[in-house]
Amino acid sequence: YIYILMYARTFVYMPCFNLLHMKKGYFSCFRIVCFPSFLYVCKHNPNVLKSKMSKMYKLIMIMVCCLASLSQVRSQTVAVKSNLLSDATLTPHVGVELALHKQVSVDVSGEFNGWTINKKSWKHWDVQPEVRYWLFECFNGHYLGLNGLYMDYDMQGVVWPLGMKKDYAYDGKAYGVGLSYGYQLYLTPRWNLDISAGVGYTYLKYDKYNFADHLYLGKYKNNYFGLCKASIAIVYIIK
């Protein structure tokens, strides 16, 4: 299991190394932030891959395609990032952002969680694209964003901000759209800190079960309006 995850990590990062002709050392900090979460999942949940590998593979492929597409836009500024809030909950997060214009950029981020503790789980994977308009210039200062969301989840025994309660289990999908505001703080010529939050609409459809006895309760739909994004991300800018 660990071998497969290590291979998947290499599959994601190597195109970026080849594309940018940069040394691996530049990305060591980024890998250190994300990859320990995967190893924790491997150690404590050896059977996660059997049910979740196909979903994780989709996420990896999406990110690889984004990185591969950058080979056509070498003259543009590119950044890779990880949301520290997600990483802190053992939900590895990775994103890539491309400047299309002095004040316009496109960001594609995703995350994966596959752990179970005491029969409680927050298993999910999601992809969140966003178009950003910067008030001054890309990767510097204030910006406004328009974002979308796709999420596949299988959660049980936990409280979730989208109206889910710990007495039940939920297996379904979510689709959303929202607006965000953020500020990117300059740290060094290569490193920034990105702080952002957003509100929006999320549509959920799921199968619902009792958490205690896993009794099937039926199919449900739900509409959510409110906070849909919160991020404190470390950003590495590639010139």
Image (cartoon, grey):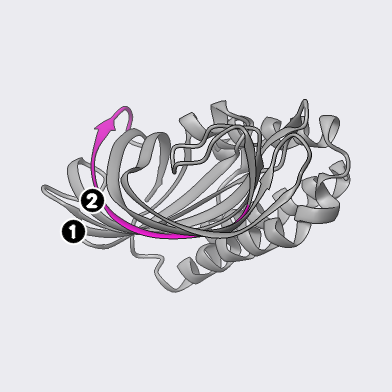
Q: Picture coordinates of residue 104 (x, y %)?
A: 22, 60
> Mostly what secondary structure, the magenta segment?
strand
Q: Which residue appears at 64% of the width and 65% of the height?
A: 61
Asked if the residues shown at circle 2 and circle 1 are in contact, with their CB atoms under 8 angstroms apart, the answer is yes
Q: Picture coordinates of residue 228 (x, y %)?
A: 36, 45
Q: Which residue appears at 50% of the width and 57% of the height?
A: 127
Residue 177 is covered by the magenta coloring: yes
The residue indicated by pointer 2 is 138
Residue in front for this viewpoint, 144 or 194: 144
Residue in front for this viewpoint, 8 or 150: 150
Q: How many residues crowd around disc 1 within 10 Å: few (fewer than 14), some, or many (20 or more)?
A: some
Q: Is residue 37 above or below residue 21?
A: above
Q: Which residue appears at 69% of the width and 56% of the height?
A: 56
Q: Is residue 98 above or below residue 234?
A: below
Q: Which residue appears at 81% of the width and 45% of the height?
A: 48
Residue in front for this viewpoint, 236 or 209: 209
Q: How many residues crowd around disc 2 within 10 Å: few (fewer than 14), some, or many (20 or more)?
A: many
SS assignment at label 2: loop
How far apart are the two marked residues, 2 and 1, measured between alpha carbons? Answer: 6 Å
- The amino acid marked with disc number 2 is Cys
Q: Which residues are magenta?
A: 171-188
Q: Quadrant of residue 233?
A: top left
Q: Picture coordinates of residue 227 (x, y %)?
A: 32, 41
- The amino acid marked with disc number 1 is Lys
The residue indicated by pointer 1 is 102
SS assignment at label 1: loop
Q: Quadrant of residue 185?
A: top left
